[in-house]
Amino acid sequence: MFNDLLRPSRYKALYGGRGSAKSHFFAEAMVANAHGNKGFRAVCVREVQKSLKESAKRLIEDKIAVTGVDGFEVLNDSIKTPGGGVITFQGMQDHTAESIKSLEGFNVAWVEEAQTLSARSLEMLRPTIRAPKSELWFSWNPRSADDPVDAFFRGPTPPEDAIIRRINYDQNMFFPAELEAERQHDAKNNRDRYGHVWLGEYEPMAVGAIWDRLMIHNGRRETAPTMGRIVVAVDPAGSSEPGSDEHGIVAVGKGDEDNHGYVLDDASMKGTPRQWGERVIATYDRYDADCVAAEVNYGGDMVEQTIKSIRPDVPVIQVRATRGKHVRAEPIAALYSLGRIHHVGTFDRLEDQMCQMTAAGYEGNGSPDRLDAMVWGMTELFPQMVQTKTRTVHVPSLGTGGWMA
């Protein structure tokens, strides 16, 4: 499962839950590189390292012992490697822009617990490791989509020459029985945190959320069946100014045979009305959708006009919010709990918003734009789940114009 990580690459990033062997792989790779390359120098870093007990030093020592390789000398604060090299262990918070220059000639930097790495530390470390063919390794259990390491590797523009892999316990052929017992216990008794601990999902933020990570994961599918109906739902933000919320754009479908709901894509974005309109149409075309469901609380009829200025004949269903977001979301959450809605793949930012919606309201930052779009789409597919809904169906017209274009 780690074979592709053996080839050279500037960045190697492994994220996931407990028991996935992320750290074991990088520790073994560290020993193998040091043994095969005389004078190999590496640094294992964390954001904060108060003592070596918190580092990967003991794990690397164990790998040296198990593999039986020679030429290593374990010291109190470092490990000497064959040919005069060294593996050292440091905390990024202890460095300044000047002191970190001491690492410029190192071949590898391995960032452990990378979810805690600050933006400042990431910014300092990347250009510091600059030796020819040098590599930066990252291992972490995701905490939030806003953490710098997640934004860097899992955001819209990940770095080039990077191997980025999600890996969990079920891909570890050596997953021990003791951990399996712990995992099963958490699946039954710690559902709120199960997804984070064992599946590498983002940390649950809201107590009493109407969705939980395990519920979403249990309904996950790798592929979608034949769809009987597909809707692209859009929840436009009230502004396209810097710092404004995203425009929620989510494609959902209803299975032709099982009548289950499927989240097919999350195409949400920031941008001007023209840009989000083009993204809506592109998503509509990609999935050969039947219609677009557009919330018109902000912009009114101009929301529809924005879409039709790009594609005049696209069917648009206007939906208007008359109740709170959490009230609209609860019937759809009930379908998830019944196992009737599935995610085709993983949609981290959408799922993060879902797990911050409680019966009292949304507890995340900003607006749950992605979640709103998903709820509107599913509501259009399952209207019987909602007692009342204000909706106006507009017959396609050839009108032109744009909203804030």
Image (tube, rainbow, N blue to C red):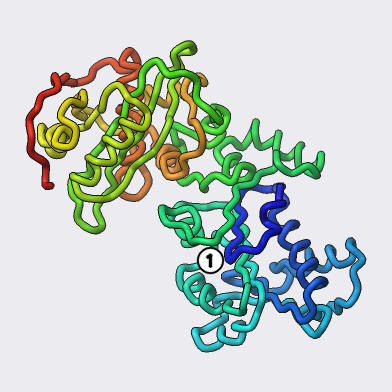
> Does residue 201 lie above or below 315 as drawn?
below
Residue picked out by circle 1: 117
| Residue 127 picture location, percent across and down | 51, 77
State the image quarter where residue 286 is shown. Answer: top left
The image quarter containing residue 23 is bottom right
Question: Does residue 313 sit above or below 154 in this rendering?
Answer: above
Residue located 73% across and 40% down the image: 182
Is 313 or 42 nearer to us in this picture? 313
Mark 1 crowdedness (10 Å alpha carbons): few <14, some 14-19, many ≥20: many
In the figure, is residue 288 to the left or right of 177?
left
334 left or right of 95 in image: left
> Is residue 327 visible to the viewer in this orientation of the structure?
no
392 vs 109: above or below: above
Instruction: Name the residue rendered at 47%, 43% in the picture.
Output: 348
* Residue at x-position 31% and y-position 31%: 284
Amino acid type, mark 1: Leu
Q: Residue at x 59, y 58 (%)?
A: 13
Task: Examine the rendered structure and indicate whether residue 399 appears above or below residue 26.
Answer: above
How far across and down, in percent of the image, does residue 2 sit?
71, 51
Q: Position of 65 compared to 334: left or right? A: right
SS at mark 1 in the image? loop
Camera sees residue 312: yes
Which residue is nearer to you in this view: 257 or 237? Answer: 257
